[in-house]
Amino acid sequence: MQVRKAAIECLTKIIHAKFKADVAIQRAGQYFEVRERKMLHECVYGVLRHSFSLEADFSRFIKDKPDDNAYAALAVGTYQLRHMRVPTHAAVSETVSAIKQLNPKAAGFVNAVLRRVSSSQPPKKLKPNQRTELPKWMYAQWRDAFGADEVQAFCEALKQPPMLCLALFTDRDIWIEQVQALGIEAEVGELSPYAVLLPVGTDVVALPGFEAGAFTVMDQAAQAAVMALKMPRVDGLILDLCAAPGGKTALLAHRFPEARIIAVELNEKRLPRLQENLSRLSCDNVVVMQGDAMKLPFDESSADAIFLDAPCSASGILRRHPDAKLLHDLEAVEKLSLLQTAMLKESLRVLKTDGKMVYAVCSIHQQENEHVISSLGKTVISRDNRRLLPTIYHDGFFHATIEKCSFPTL
């Protein structure tokens, strides 16, 4: 009952107060046992991944819009009935007991609706955005950009928890053999020579080489973006902007061991973890700096290469952050695209004319992809623009290789 109560409270905060799911779960589950925390995570993230079809399911049996807690309770109860191996009587009674603590007046209503859900089949006809578990505006944008069939296909991947992906800094074949000897399935990633894929829920800390810094957790789509960066000179200066928590920085450090790398991060609270990760991963050629990517403390034309992992709507990583589709609307995406453009222009100011730069975002919205690049006009040359749509093997991602022109092209 307490886990379900916590799940209802988390979802109410996420859906209506725009809390991030990981923050809400961490606060709510800090005093739970491991098994309870796992169930809390499953309930919250499961509801977020299937939120639109769940709403279509239970809303058939209600006339008036429920209050926030009752809505979350209906979603939690319906998720258990449709997607979890929880006995029907427990899914209903425990959820009703949970809502009694939060809103006693809603208990009878929630009980009645969940009993109707439990005695019925899921609705056969769903709207396209409900089938894809997307907000209407997001589905419409992606349908127009990629086609309805493509969206339906990659949204099936977005409904599933992601596999664990590592960037491996030791011999990949030997390490995979070690892991397989422990009875853990492992396979190489196709997007990066460093990538290894492991089953969902694999304990990272228990893997061979964790303490020795043999790897870092990093999706292979993000690794592909890092692999796109080229260096004009092996001992040059690389700026890694918006660097925390440091996975991309570490991959840059291992790719370019002779380069000087400055990892720039604005959020002071994220600096200790960034430093800790880089230390564990033996990134001795990296200096960490607190700084604003909108106002970089570097001279013009001083950096040989820049990697800008810009803040974005996270629309490409809904497998691991399904709350992102509820935290950002179209207006927020437009504002983020302006921020990305400003960061990109500031980055170009400090990039040498013959320097190399990669702009990357974990979003597949065109406003945060090609539109940002095109907003720079003819002051840059953009090469190798690449958008990866989500699959079960990797996140959605966009990156572009950018060169600064000596003179604007006509």
Image (cartoon, helix red, strand yellow):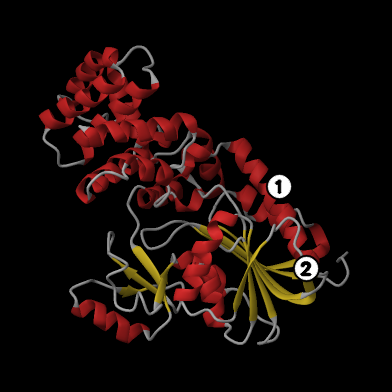
Q: CA distance from mark 2 to mark 1?
A: 22 Å
Q: Which residue is mark 1?
A: 338
Amino acid type, label 1: Leu
Q: Where the C terminus falls, by quadrant? A: bottom right
Q: Position of residue 204 (x, y in %)?
A: 32, 67
- Tell me the quarter of the picture where residue 354 sits: bottom right
Q: Is residue 340 left or right of residue 318?
A: right
Q: Position of residue 285 (x, y in %)?
A: 59, 81
Q: Position of residue 87 (x, y in %)?
A: 11, 35
Residue depicted at 52% across the width and 79% down the height? 283
Residue depicted at 19% across the width and 33% down the height? 81
Q: How many marks?
A: 2
Q: Is residue 223 left or right of residue 338?
A: left
Residue 119 is marked as none
Q: Where the N terminus falls, by quadrant? A: top left
Helix, strand or loop at label 2? It is loop
Q: Which residue is mark 2?
A: 298
Residue depicted at 36% across the width and 17% down the height? 66
Q: Does the image show residue 52?
A: no
Q: Position of residue 377 (x, y in %)?
A: 80, 57
Task: Characterize the local packing of mark 1: few (<14), some (14-19) or many (20 or more) Cα atoms within 10 angstroms.
Answer: some
Helix, strand or loop at label 1? It is helix
Frontmost residue, 265 versus 127: 265
